[in-house]
Image (cartoon, rainbow, N blue to C red):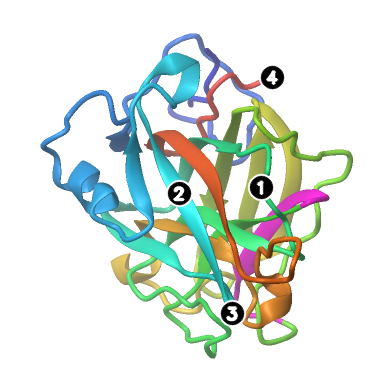
Amino acid sequence: MLFLIALSSNVNIAQNPSIQDERKPVPVLKINFDEDMESKEFKALLGLKHIEFASGDGVNGSDGIKANYVGYEKGSERIVKNITLPDTYEEATLNYAVKFDKDFQFPITGKLHGLGPKNKVTGGKPMRPDGWSARITFSDNGLKPYVYHQHLKGTYGEGKRAEGFQFTKGVFYDLAIYVKINTPANANNGQVLIYANGKKIASYNALQLRAEEGNDTEISNFMFSTFHGGSSPKYAPKDSLGHYTTVFAWFDDFEVYEGLYVRGAK
């Protein structure tokens, strides 16, 4: 396992992202469905509509969760839960594993999990000085960052598609999204990086995520957020007759780390 760490007091992780060390840091949040079954985070996810416990269907036969993507007129029904982190952070990495069913559909695009501040901006809502969000979107062509930032050109989140990457159905992928907020708040030095199986595949740089200082604008929420959409029937999974249908994916091993830490980094 590789991770990035400052080796001395005058070394900065964000300025030196290639520094590596064999020691593994301790996650500030961990949900892997094999342990801590009484934790509030475990119960929060298992309590979501369209989420079910998946014994033996996690990574390497461990336990995981199954997400049921129920098609409807706005894509698929939303499966969302914001889980508050134990502190606020200027930079953090969310790692998790996902496997799409062999019959999964990728009509246009959909959302995967990410990180955000206290007052997250999503769903095409107007930007606000203390609000932003950073997630991943999926499609049959792969994935891309999906970021709401202060200089958004349109109504919805932005990000450039990862070149040369495409999901294979029925296979677990270890995804990671790293977010560094801009510091100070008037600077354009924020960053969002996306990794798949330890390899960096997409980046979004020179971002002004926030326009106000303070803990409320730092990273403080794990955004469990997955669905098809968009907001029209063209995003929805459908059967051969054109009726809305349900498709599935599995998730496991959610971990949030302060700073940049990517499982299996290459």
Q: Nearer the viewer, residue 184 or 18?
A: 18
Give the magenta range.
140-152
Q: CA distance from mark 4 to mark 3?
A: 38 Å
Q: Earlier in the sequence, mark 2 or mark 3?
A: 2
Residue 67 numbered mark, or none:
2
The residue tagged 3 is: 74
Choose mark 4 or mark 3, whichever is in front: 3
Q: Residues within 10 Å of mark 2 (few under 14, many from 20)?
A: many
Q: CA distance from mark 4 to mark 2?
A: 29 Å
Q: Residue at x 77, y 65 (%)?
A: 108
Q: Earlier in the sequence, mark 1 or mark 4?
A: 1
Q: Earlier in the sequence, mark 4 or mark 3?
A: 3
Going by the numbered disc 4, the residue's amino acid type is: Lys
Choose mark 1 or mark 4, whichever is in front: 1
Going by the numbered disc 3, the residue's amino acid type is: Lys
The residue tagged 4 is: 266
Going by the numbered disc 1, the residue's amino acid type is: Phe
